[in-house]
């Protein structure tokens, strides 16, 4: 109620009291009279009634749908239809039949009047009872930044109770001030406000203001511009770091299983990417089953898929180790080739069963959407994958540090012969290690199914990258894989804006190739004779 | 020295290659199609392609079989050689392209380029292109190898970074800005040195040239591996640090063979491109380079002839199978990888000659004079 | 130490090296005169092999001097360079080129040019052949000259490796546990062989086998935890209580 009052007051000022006391009906009937200036006065008067029906009338007027019938000079709202127009009472909206087109004259509006209408409409929605509508109006007011609306904004700010809307209104006011002929102090205040907002729209308003006729304002705007640019650069760095960490977490998931088997056995498992792919397909199958038989479980599909993917990929991993790698120990190059063969077979198997096309894997509700922190936008799926990667890493660390099998794995990593001599069943440890690495590949597949296309080629896309992570981080060291993945992820994302995605990747590869020259064993290399020979 | 390099097996191999080089074109061009001895133009093109693969395989065997360097990026050198030749063929199209621009290849006109990029200059001259065919892969291999070998990057580490190298090139060549035709690569060639690339005569000529290049590459490799240098290479393969402590700077030798091998691969690529009529970034794909290695493994590493046999067997199988049931090919290739590494470590030829030696030893005929098995390269000086 | 480096063949002073904080060699100082043969003994892990790694350029010392032939700072050179200067080394684990013939093993070890292109065009000269024959006699492998080295027995491989060392005609020979894995008779033959070559070369032998050391009959250095514990004749050091402690105390 307070709001309506404020609005009436506000509009009444512009009205000069002339038509103040008339009813809505009378005002509408008076619309065709006089010239555009008179019409503008009536428009303000209509708005000043505070009548909710006024909005519809003014919109119709702006569209050219308010017309005057030649027969009785009455004012109607028209809508195309029938032989010519369907006509309605403009205020009550009740139907009055139809007329031919030439039986009605438009109540003319020119661009000036249209602007006027838009402004009063804006002011009216600013006073709407629905906070969402008000927010929307404030955002529009910000982008039009019309100095004319300052009064309306002031009134709205005064009346506003919701903080968020109030803030938006103040921003809109500041934007409008910048375009008005306000004083330097006022503009300075507005600039500070815009700097605080610090987004691209604010920047463009500030940039426009650097051309202000008043040199003092222009100078203040230039300073503000610099500030905003600094803030924006900071946020964009933060965004890049986040993208980099996100990419890093994906790389780490893909690489960490590899790091384990490479570290413990010194063999390169070229089928690792395909084990990741199997994990993604396991997710797909789980979701298919859920869709068909228990749709309400869909939000749990990933949780259900995790153990299944782990077992599937892990099982295949153990089979690869027992069936192929075991026979090739001490011949790492041959192992590499044989596992490459395995990868081809796995790929083709999946292609034969599921077809070569991408499979649809959905995001559960908690994995979709995004939220903002300042100017940073974070999608939930990336966030969860990041968290998941860290959890997997932590679990793996625990397994290696605290369990007997972990102890044995570390023993074999450091000195296979010695471990063998001490009674560690190296064959069994190898199978378990390989299985563990493969199982983690499966887990990675579940995560990747959320952000990448699930197709038989999924694994191929990661294999070179994961090797780079392992080689860069240093073999046989989980922390190396962690550091390697995140470094490469962040470096990649920071290069992208300058070099483009492809060239950034090329540069990273070249960087790693050069890096290996300096530290042939990676960042966190184990040292020792057993490793060297 | 040449005589030393040519033991009986090598002589037989060279003789066969030279006969093929002469005979196939004759059978294609001068024997009427109705005759049973006629070789179709399709077959000429296909086998011509195999011959370039065989040369590529030899180049890989030179470093892997004899020096233990497993390069999983040799496809890159092949492709670079191919691109060098492709650039010449592009320039030779001249104003007969779709856009009839006398200087710029079609794709550059399409991208609205106004000038020829600097690295395209000179490729209008055939001799220059030929030089680049060996120099560019050679230079890349030299620089790459210099860094890698000096820092003693060996074994699987080396293999992995060669994969990264070819992957980086793949990505780079996909970019339009690189100036190599991006995704589509270089194609629509018209002729080479004035000979129409579509004509049977030119194709037969390219076939003969490929066979000669194979013979030449084989000879060069034989000369290297039968020299004292070749013995050092094998020493490096078998006991690198022992070799070092005997006063050999291992990196120098590796660098030499690696560069030589890359140049041979470049030549193979240069012969490949006019025969298939296209070169695109796909040739840089990491998977391609791994496949080359399996050709060598199938034939038998460290034998040179084995690489040739392997390249032909695997590629013939590929042609047959993909024509027959395409899905089977990857299964088959995967199975070949596994089978060969597990059960046939010496490859088809190695296995065969071990088998022959076994029979020989059983029959006890002059086994004393002949010496031990000939599965490893014969290195008599 | 106040030894002048001019008349020494190998001079180590205050050498230390640590691996991940573990001091494998600790302030080690050692002097070998020209033509001298020295036996180095010490328990496992004493740093004997690491010392050889340092001399031959495989491992860079963290600090200390390693001077060869009076004036060459070995820490500035790589393995191949040091080998060419005349430091030959036999590994603890016998390492020969298994797929080469015995003769080729020696051929490749002969002193001579190591340039890539020289080797590409190298031909076997009469002098080289004569030297190979001589060495084959010395290491008693004349009748197995054209067999692959892989076919040799363990002891024969050790000899072949010593032969390869001699083929380099080195000024200093570093021999790491030559008698390991040999029969008693072979051990004695090996000691004999080393004594034979001693005069012309400076030799450092690392060995556990006390009988072998006794058979060499030379000055002994005892290494323990990366530094010299005692030095002198075998009888002298073996009566040293510290040495007894180290050997029997563990
Ligand atoms: N490259 C290396 N990295 C880590 N530790 C090493 C390395 N080389 C030697 N060591 C350590 O130094 C110590 C000395 O070893 P070594 O010289 O082989 O002893 P010895 O030959 O006297 O038995 C051992 O504890 C060994 O583990
Ligand atoms: Mg030792």
Image (cartoon, helix red, strand yellow):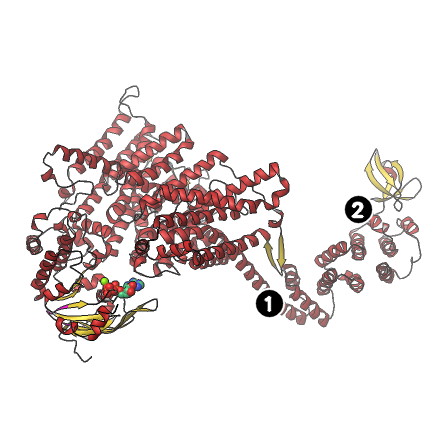
Q: Pointer 2 indicates a residue of which chain? A: A
A419 on left or right of C112 = right
Residue A78 percent across, percent down from the top left: 84, 41
Q: Quadrant of ligand 1?
A: bottom left
The answer to whether the residue bearing label 2 lies less than 8 angstroms from the nearest atom of ligand 1 is no
- Image: magenta residue range: C32-38
Sequence order check: which comes first, mark 2 or mark 1? Answer: 2
Residue B64 percent across, percent down from the top left: 27, 46
Quadrant where the image shows the C terminus of chain A: bottom left
Quarter of the view holding residue A376: bottom right
Quadrant where the image shows the N terminus of chain A: bottom right
Give the camera-side residue of A496 and A270: A270
Q: Which mark is residue A368?
A: none
- What secondary structure is found at the residue carrying circle 2? helix
Give the camera-side residue of B237 and A1: B237
How far apart in space, not on screen, are marks 2 and 1 (Cα)?
43 Å
Q: Which mark is residue A226?
A: 1
Does residue B346 show up? Answer: yes
Give the camera-side residue of B12 and C102: C102
Q: Which mark is residue A63?
A: 2
- What secondary structure is found at the residue carrying circle 1? helix
Mark nearer the viewer, 2 or 1: 1
Q: Pointer 1 indicates a residue of which chain? A: A
Does residue B110 show up? Answer: no
A500 on left or right of B187 = right
């Amino acid at each position: 109620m307070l709001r309506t009052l404020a609005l009436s007051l506000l509009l009444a000022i512009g009205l000069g009291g002339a038509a103040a006391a008339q009813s809505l009906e009378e005002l509408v009937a008076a619309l065709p009279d006089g010239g555009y200036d008179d019409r503008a006065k009536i428009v303000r008067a209509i708005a000043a009634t505070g009548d909710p029906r006024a909005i519809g009338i003014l919109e119709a007027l702006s569209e050219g749908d308010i017309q005057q019938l030649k027969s009785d000079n009455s004012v109607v709202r028209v809508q195309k239809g029938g032989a010519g127009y369907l006509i309605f009472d403009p205020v009550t909206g009740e139907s009055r039949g139809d007329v031919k087109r030439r039986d009605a004259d438009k109540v003319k509006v020119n661009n000036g009047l249209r602007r006027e209408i838009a402004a009063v409409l804006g002011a009216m929605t600013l006073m709407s009872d629905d906070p969402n509508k008000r927010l929307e109006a404030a955002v529009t007011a910000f982008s039009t930044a019309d100095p004319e609306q300052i009064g309306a904004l002031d009134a709205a700010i005064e009346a506003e109770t919701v903080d968020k809307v109030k803030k938006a209104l103040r921003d809109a006011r500041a934007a409008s001030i910048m375009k008005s002929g306000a004083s330097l102090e006022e503009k300075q205040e507005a600039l500070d406000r815009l700097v605080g907002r610090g987004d691209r729209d604010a920047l463009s308003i500030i940039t426009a203001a650097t051309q202000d006729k008043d040199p003092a304002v222009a100078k203040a705007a230039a300073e503000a511009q610099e500030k905003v640019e600094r803030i924006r650069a900071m946020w964009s760095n933060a965004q890049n770091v986040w993208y980099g960490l996100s990419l890093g977490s994906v790389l780490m998931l893909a690489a960490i299983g590899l790091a384990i088997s490479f570290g413990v056995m010194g063999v390169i498992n070229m089928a690792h990417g395909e084990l990741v792919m199997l994990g993604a397909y396991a997710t797909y199958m789980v979701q298919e089953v859920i869709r068909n038989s228990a749709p309400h479980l869909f939000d749990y599909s990933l949780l259900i898929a995790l153990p299944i993917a782990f077992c599937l990929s892990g099982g295949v991993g153990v089979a690869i180790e027992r069936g192929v790698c075991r026979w090739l120990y001490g011949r790492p190059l041959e192992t590499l080739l044989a596992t490459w063969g395995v990868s081809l077979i796995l790929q083709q198997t999946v292609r034969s069963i599921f077809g070569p096309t991408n499979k649809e894997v959905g995001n559960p509700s908690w994995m979709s959407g995004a939220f903002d922190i300042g100017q940073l936008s974070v999608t939930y799926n990336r966030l969860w994958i990041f968290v998941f990667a860290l959890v997997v890493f932590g679990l793996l660390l625990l397994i290696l540090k605290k369990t007997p099998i972990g102890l044995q794995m570390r023993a074999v990593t450091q000195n296979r012969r010695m471990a063998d001599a001490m009674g560690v069943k190296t064959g069994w440890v190898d199978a378990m290690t390989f299985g563990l690495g493969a199982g983690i590949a499966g887990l990675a597949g579940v995560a990747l199914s959320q952000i990448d296309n699930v197709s038989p080629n999924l694994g191929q896309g990661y294999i070179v990258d994961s090797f780079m992570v392992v080689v860069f981080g240093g073999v046989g060291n989980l922390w190396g894989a962690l550091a390697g993945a995140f470094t490469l992820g962040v470096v990649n994302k920071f290069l992208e804006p300058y070099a483009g995605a492809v060239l950034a990747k090329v540069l990273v590869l070249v960087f790693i190739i050069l890096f290996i020259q300096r530290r042939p064993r990676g960042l966190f290399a184990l040292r020792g004779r057993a490793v060297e020979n | 020295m040449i005589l030393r390099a040519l033991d009986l097996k090598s002589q037989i191999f060279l003789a066969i290659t030279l006969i093929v080089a002469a005979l196939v074109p004759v059978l294609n061009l001068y024997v009427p199609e109705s005759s049973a001895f006629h070789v179709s133009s399709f077959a000429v093109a296909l086998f011509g392609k195999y011959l370039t693969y065989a040369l590529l395989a030899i180049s890989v065997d030179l470093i892997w079989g004899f020096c233990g360097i497993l390069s999983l990026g040799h496809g890159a050198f092949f492709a670079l050689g191919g691109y060098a030749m492709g650039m010449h063929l592009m320039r030779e199209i001249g104003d007969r392209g779709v856009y009839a621009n006398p200087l710029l290849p079609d794709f550059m006109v399409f991208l609205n380029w106004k000038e020829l990029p600097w690295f395209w200059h000179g490729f209008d001259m055939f001799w220059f292109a030929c030089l680049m065919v060996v120099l560019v892969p050679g230079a890349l291999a030299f620089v790459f190898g210099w860094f890698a070998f000096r820092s003693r990057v060996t074994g699987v580490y080396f293999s992995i970074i060669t994969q990264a190298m070819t992957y980086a090139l793949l990505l780079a060549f996909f970019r339009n800005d690189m100036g190599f035709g991006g995704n589509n690569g270089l194609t629509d060639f018209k002729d080479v040195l004035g000979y129409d690339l579509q004509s049977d005569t030119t194709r037969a000529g390219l076939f003969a040239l490929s066979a000669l290049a194979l013979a030449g590459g084989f000879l060069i490799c034989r000369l290297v591996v039968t020299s004292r240098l070749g013995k050092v290479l094998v020493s490096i393969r078998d006991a690198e640090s022992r070799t070092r402590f005997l006063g050999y700077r291992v990196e120098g030798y590796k660098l030499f063979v690696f560069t030589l091998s890359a140049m041979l691969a470049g030549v193979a690529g240069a012969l490949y491109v006019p025969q298939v009529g296209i070169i695109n970034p796909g040739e840089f794909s990491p998977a391609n380079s791994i496949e080359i290695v399996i050709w060598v493994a199938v034939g038998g590493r460290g034998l040179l002839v084995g690489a040739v046999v392997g390249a032909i067997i695997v590629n013939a199988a590929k042609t047959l199978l993909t024509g027959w049931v395409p899905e089977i090919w990857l299964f088959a290739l995967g199975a070949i990888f596994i089978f060969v590494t597990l059960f046939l470590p010496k490859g088809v030829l190695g296995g065969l000659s071990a088998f022959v030696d076994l029979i020989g030893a059983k029959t006890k005929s002059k086994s004393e004079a002949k010496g031990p098995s000939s599965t490893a390269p014969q290195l008599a000086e | 130490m106040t030894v002048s480096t001019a008349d020494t063949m190998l001079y180590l002073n205050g050498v230390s090296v640590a691996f991940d904080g573990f001091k494998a060699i600790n302030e080690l100082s050692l002097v070998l005169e020209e033509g001298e043969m020295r036996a180095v003994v010490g328990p496992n892990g004493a740093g004997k092999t690491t010392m050889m790694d340092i001399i031959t350029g495989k491992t860079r010392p963290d600090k200390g001097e390693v001077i060869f032939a009076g004036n060459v700072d070995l820490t500035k050179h790589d393995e191949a360079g040091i080998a060419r200067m005349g430091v030959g080394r036999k590994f603890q684990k016998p390492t020969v080129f298994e797929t080469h013939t015995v003769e080729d093993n020696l051929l490749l070890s002969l002193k001579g040019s190591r340039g890539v292109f020289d080797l590409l065009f190298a031909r076997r000269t009469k002098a080289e052949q004569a030297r190979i024959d001589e060495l084959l006699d010395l290491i008693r492998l004349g009748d197995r000259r054209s067999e692959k080295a892989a076919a040799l027995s363990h002891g024969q491989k050790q000899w072949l490796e010593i032969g390869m060392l001699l083929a380099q005609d080195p000024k200093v020979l570093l021999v790491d546990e030559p008698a390991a894995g040999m029969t008693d008779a072979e051990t004695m033959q090996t000691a004999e062989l080393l004594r034979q070559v001693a005069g012309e070369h400076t030799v450092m032998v690392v060995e556990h086998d006390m009988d072998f050391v006794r058979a060499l009959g030379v000055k002994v250095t005892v290494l323990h935890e990366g530094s010299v514990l005692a030095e002198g004749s075998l009888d002298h050091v073996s009566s040293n209580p510290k040495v007894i402690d180290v050997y029997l105390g563990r």
